[in-house]
Each structure stands twice: as C-alpha cells, then as structure tokens.
Image (spheres, helix red, strand yellow):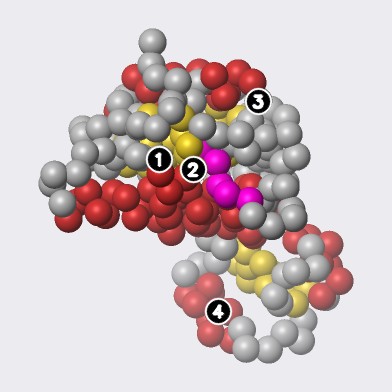
C-alpha cells in the first residue's frame, strides 16, 4: 500500500454486515466510530457503502527516480493523461492500468483531475498500489520517458494507424487526451505514433477511460505474443509514426 496509515474508520449507524470489518480495524489499532448515515454521506458522498476509511493522502512518485528504478530493457507500460477533467475517468484509467500491470500513471499537476477522493473511489483501490507521478509539464514528462527508452502512443480520432495495426514497443507510454478536446497540440507533437480506434457506429468518440483500456490491453496482447515468439520484434513503432529526431 502507498497510503499512510488509516486514520479513522467511520461506520454508518445501523449498517449491517460490517462486524468483521469493525473487529479487524479495532485489532489493527484503527480508531473506529459510528455516525449517522447523513454524516457519512456528507463526508464521502452518497455512494458510500455503509463505511468509510479516512487515510493519509497518496504520495506521488518522482518520475525520473521511478524510471531509473525500472529494470533495464524489460517490458513496461506507462499511462499518461493529458488534462483529463473527470475524476471518475481518471480513477477508471488507473484501475485498468493497475490491472494490466502498468508501472506508473502520469498526470499533470494543474488544470486536470487530481488524486481526489472521487478518483480513488473510481479506482477501486488501484491508486493504493499503482505509482502515480504528478508533473508540472506533460511534454517534459514524455521527454523523460523517451530518454528512458519508451515510445509514446497518443490516442487520437485522426491517428495515422488503427490500434490493432500499431506495433507497440515493449516499453511504451499510452497517452490519452482530455474529454471533448482530446490531445493538446504540444502533446500530439511529442507522440511517436497517433493511434485511432475505429468508429463504425453513429457516435463520434469513445469515453477516455474506455479508449485507454482498449489500448492498454492491445499493448498487453502484443507483448504477450512477442514473449512467446522471439522472432517478433518490439523495438519500436511502425505504421506511419512521425519518428524521432
């Protein structure tokens, strides 16, 4: 767990089925208390399921230090969010990133959804174990990743290559843009390949968390294939990327 200690456990008065949790918290030395359901709702929102744990805030990791700690040459996935505004989208992306074994989530420190209680609830515990780097400038972060041997793949409606045809590198950064406006121009320029998901229905775009999930699992599928067949290469992208200078 990357949280500090649980400071307090609050259980709604009259809530049932939580006796074991109450006993375990008390055994661990966590302060427990009962409160009216209305007080619990004011504390964490109306989607609380009868209890809430008050914990220390998430401690972000230093991106450069984290990159240095990764095993040299080993497959690794990073996920970067370009100024997402909805904490539920951020949490859902974190949940999928943790599920596929991503090594970190990268988010901007300004004008974006942060590591809030809403994001944590949507992440369903993923932010407790998934390292998260909060950076002042996302293009700077992508440059640091590139220096560490990563290739960057931006999700874009006008991407040069369909996601299933993109040859994902073993060390990859998947970049997802903000709701409605997508990737910012500066972030687009820092992507090695812009990848599109086919839209064959009447809607014009996918939810950011859904698009990110599709790309994360495509990376996972391709890296698994490479692991089974040494003749396959995953040294870098192909299929219309802007290349590196």
Residues at badges 1 and 2 in contact (C-beta under 8 Å)?
yes
| Viewer-side label of 1, 4 | 1
Residue 41: name its quadrant: bottom right
Q: CA distance from mark 3 to mark 4?
A: 45 Å
Check disc 4 and report the residue beneath it. 21
Residue 184 marker: 3
Q: CA distance from mark 1 to mark 3?
A: 21 Å
Label 4, secondary structure: give it: helix
Whether residue 90 appears in this view of the structure is yes
Examine the residues drawn in magenta and state their main secondary structure.
loop
Callout 1 crowding tier (Cα within 10 Å): few <14, some 14–19, many ≥20: many
Residue 162 marker: 2
Position in image of residue 127 (x %, y %)? 52, 52
Q: CA distance from mark 2 to mark 4?
A: 47 Å
Label 1, secondary structure: give it: loop
Q: Earlier in the sequence, mark 2 or mark 3?
A: 2
The residue segment tinted magenta is 195-199
**In the image, farthest residue toward the left:** 230
Position in image of residue 190 (x %, y %)? 50, 21
Label 2, secondary structure: give it: strand
Residue 29 in the magenta stretch? The answer is: no
Callout 4 crowding tier (Cα within 10 Å): few <14, some 14–19, many ≥20: few
At 74% from the left and 55% from the top, the residue drawn is 202
- Quadrant holding the N terminus: bottom left
At 49% from the left and 43% from the top, the residue drawn is 162
């Amino acid at each position: 767990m990357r949280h500090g200690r649980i400071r307090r456990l609050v259980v709604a008065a009259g809530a049932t089925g939580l006796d074991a949790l109450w006993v375990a918290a008390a055994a661990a030395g966590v302060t427990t208390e009962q409160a009216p359901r209305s007080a619990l709702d004011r504390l964490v929102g109306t989607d609380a399921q009868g209890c809430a744990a008050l914990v220390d805030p998430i401690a972000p990791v230093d991106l450069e230090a984290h990159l240095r700690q990764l095993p040299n040459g080993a497959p690794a996935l990073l996920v970067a969010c370009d100024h997402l505004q909805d904490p539920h989208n951020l949490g859902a992306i974190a949940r999928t990133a943790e599920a596929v074994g991503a090594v970190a989530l990268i988010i901007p420190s300004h004008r974006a959804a942060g590591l809030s209680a809403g994001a944590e609830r949507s992440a369903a515990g993923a932010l407790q174990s998934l390292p998260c780097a909060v950076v002042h400038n996302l293009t700077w972060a992508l440059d640091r990743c590139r220096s560490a041997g990563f290739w960057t793949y931006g999700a874009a409606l006008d991407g040069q290559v369909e996601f299933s045809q993109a040859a994902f590198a073993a060390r990859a950064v998947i970049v997802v843009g903000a709701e409605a406006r997508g990737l910012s121009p500066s972030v687009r320029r820092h992507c090695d390949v812009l990848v599109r998901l086919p839209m064959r229905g009447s809607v014009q775009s996918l939810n950011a968390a859904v698009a990110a999930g599709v790309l994360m699992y495509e990376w996972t599928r391709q890296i698994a294939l490479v692991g089974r067949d040494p003749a396959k290469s995953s040294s870098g992208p192909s299929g219309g990327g802007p290349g590196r200078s």
